[in-house]
Image (tube, rainbow, N blue to C red):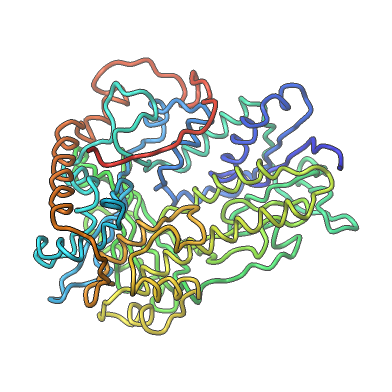
């Protein structure tokens, strides 16, 4: 066994760098206190935070609870609004050519009497829905809560307590600032400086960083959080970056911040609306909306994309000029090389469709901690870590590519190519071939690091995959479907009646409707002993 690692250096700030710093400083708190571990984050004062990824997954709540974040104060400081689902608009059309919209809900019922709910819907639900693709509404209370603009919890609920699962929409720049303050309070050393050189030793390990102002900084273990630049993992260590644009050609985003049309009507949902050569995201925060056009430069120019985005937004974008962000779609072949671990965009990125970017950071730093090396940097640790990361990106690619591949739009070359010519991963091809004959189940998936069988089932149903010859299953009875639908309607009525208005809840949490003492977002909250878990079921 080698000697213990005594120093971790994180290169790059932003959301990914400061999540890594905050997590490790929490997990290694005793070692930081007794001086046997030092964590340093080096952040360039010249590189701004991208600040596009403002929508998250429910897993971030578990991370923030583990870190000891005071949720009420965080909601105020980061202008948080709640997110109950993702919403897809116009990626497909119905038989009459009308756009189809559907939810990818956090709260769903995957089974009835131990059988996939998809079989029951195909047997009994289509007729009840009048042929409309209302599957996501039939399996979840989320759409009803969104329609009624309900929040997910009560004002007097404890931090992180959930009547239904939820995520956040937040100001990414403010969150990075708050995480920085938390990590520094935990003992993380912060250096504002630029990295001029990454120096390697005879083994090809990073031995030091030459900083513009502070000179040489020695390295034991370095985390590369330098974003798309991949300064350490790709440029210095030469680890190949596998481009995946042949699967996902969107390589640009035109982004802008706009005011709410009606500040008292904030949807608790992220929207993904199909446009001519990509899609528009709409992420409502408490104080504004973050929006943008994720598009492919193969099919539309930057100028035309900006013009299309402005036309789609309307008057609220007047006087604002969207900025163009170039995205690197793909992943580093290995995210852990020698004594360098890439976390965040330097590890990989598969466009922001399903809010996977921040989740990848959460998983990456947790996996690093569970594989934490000594000075030998044992190959089995690296191999296991890299396998997990590659599984995650394979999983993400499959689910996101499915959205494009199963479109049926005919109004632009972009959508035709996405459906007919763009390749799809072999793993997705095998899934779709299998699912022609059965409903998705957990046994069909190699991993469920982010997406599960119910996510696939909802997408397939909503995109018309089973419209022609849906698979059947013996034993499904109409009485079971009727009982389920009765329970679903009762659940929807109970939740929409019981839960408060979304904006009213946010105002109350922020102290705008009742005076409440506030400290900093990350002050006055004891860290949770372990991350929280979620197990939501339909009320019986």
Tell me what residue is drawn at x 88 percent, y 55 percent: 201
On screen, residue 461 versus residue 364, left or right, reads left
Tell me what residue is drawn at x 42 percent, y 30 percent: 74
Q: Using the rendered image of the protein, determine whether residue 110 is visible from the camera's viewpoint.
A: no
Residue 169 pos. (x, y %): 37, 43
Q: Quadrant of residue 404?
A: bottom left
Q: Is residue 309 above or below residue 180?
A: below
Tell me what residue is drawn at x 80 percent, y 43 percent: 220
Instruction: Say how many tags the image has.
Output: 0
Q: Is residue 61 above or below residue 332?
A: above
Residue 234 pos. (x, y %): 69, 62
**In the foreground, 239 or 110:** 110
**In the foreground, 152 or 243:** 152
Q: Is residue 435 above or below residue 324?
A: below
Tell me what residue is drawn at x 31 percent, y 66 percent: 460
On screen, residue 414 versus residue 25, left or right, reads left
Residue 420 pos. (x, y %): 37, 84
Q: Quadrant of residue 215?
A: top right
Q: Residue pushed farthest right? A: 202
Q: Quadrant of the C terminus?
A: top left
On screen, residue 61 versus residue 315, left or right, reads right
Residue 113 pos. (x, y %): 27, 51
**In the foreground, 533 or 115:** 115
Q: Quadrant of the N terminus?
A: top right
Q: Residue pushed farthest front? A: 475
Q: Using the rendered image of the protein, determine whether residue 370 is visible from the camera's viewpoint.
A: yes
Q: Is residue 344 above or below residue 475?
A: above
């Amino acid at each position: 066994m080698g000697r213990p690692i005594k120093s971790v250096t994180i290169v790059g700030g932003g959301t990914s760098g400061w999540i890594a710093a905050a997590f490790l400083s929490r997990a290694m708190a005793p070692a930081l206190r007794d001086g046997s571990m030092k964590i340093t984050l080096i952040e360039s004062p010249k590189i701004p935070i991208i600040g596009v990824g403002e929508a998250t997954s429910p897993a971030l709540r578990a991370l923030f609870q583990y870190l000891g974040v005071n949720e009420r104060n965080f909601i105020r400081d980061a202008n948080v609004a709640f997110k109950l689902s993702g919403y897809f608009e116009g990626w497909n059309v119905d038989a009459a050519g009308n756009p189809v919209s559907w939810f990818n809900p956090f709260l769903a019922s995957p089974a009835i009497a131990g059988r996939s709910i998809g079989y029951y819907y195909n047997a009994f639900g289509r007729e009840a829905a009048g042929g409309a693709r209302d599957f996501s509404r039939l399996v979840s209370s989320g759409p009803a809560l969104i329609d009624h603009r309900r929040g997910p919890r009560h004002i007097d609920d404890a931090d992180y307590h959930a009547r239904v699962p939820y995520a956040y929409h937040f100001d990414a720049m403010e969150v990075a600032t708050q995480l920085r303050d938390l990590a520094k309070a935990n003992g993380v050393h912060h250096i504002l400086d630029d990295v001029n050189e990454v120096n390697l030793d005879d083994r090809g390990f990073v031995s030091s960083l030459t900083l513009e102002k502070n000179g040489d900084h020695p390295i034991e273990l370095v985390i590369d959080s330098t974003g798309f630049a991949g300064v350490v993992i790709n440029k210095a260590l030469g680890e190949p970056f596998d481009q995946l644009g042949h699967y996902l050609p969107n390589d640009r985003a035109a982004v802008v911040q706009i005011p709410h049309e009606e500040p008292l009507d904030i949807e608790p949902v992220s929207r993904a609306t199909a446009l001519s050569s990509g899609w528009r995201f709409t992420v409502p925060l408490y104080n504004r909306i973050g929006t943008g056009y994720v598009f492919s430069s193969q099919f539309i120019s930057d100028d035309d994309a900006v013009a299309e985005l402005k036309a789609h937004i309307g008057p609220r974008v007047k006087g604002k000029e969207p900025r163009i962000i170039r995205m690197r779609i793909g992943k580093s072949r290995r995210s852990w090389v020698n004594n360098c671990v890439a976390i965040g965009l330097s590890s990989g990125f598969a466009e922001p469709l399903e809010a996977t970017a921040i989740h990848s950071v959460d998983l990456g730093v947790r996996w690093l901690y569970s594989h934490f090396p000594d000075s030998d940097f044992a190959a089995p640790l690296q191999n296991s870590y890299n396998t997990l990361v590659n599984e995650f990106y394979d999983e993400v690619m499959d689910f996101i590519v499915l959205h494009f591949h199963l479109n049926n739009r005919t109004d632009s070359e972009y959508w035709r190519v996405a459906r007919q010519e763009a390749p799809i991963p072999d793993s997705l091809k095998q899934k779709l071939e299998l699912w022609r004959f059965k409903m998705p189940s957990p046994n069909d998936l190699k991993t469920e690091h982010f997406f599960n069988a119910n996510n696939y089932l909802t997408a397939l149903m909503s995109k018309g995959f089973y419209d022609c010859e849906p698979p059947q299953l013996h034993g499904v009875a109409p009485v079971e479907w009727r009982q389920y639908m009765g329970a679903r309607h009762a659940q929807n009525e109970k939740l929409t009646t019981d839960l408060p208005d979304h904006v009213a809840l946010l105002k109350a949490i922020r102290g705008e409707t009742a005076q409440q003492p506030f400290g900093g977002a990350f002050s006055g909250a004891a860290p949770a002993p372990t991350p929280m878990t979620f197990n939501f079921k339909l009320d019986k």
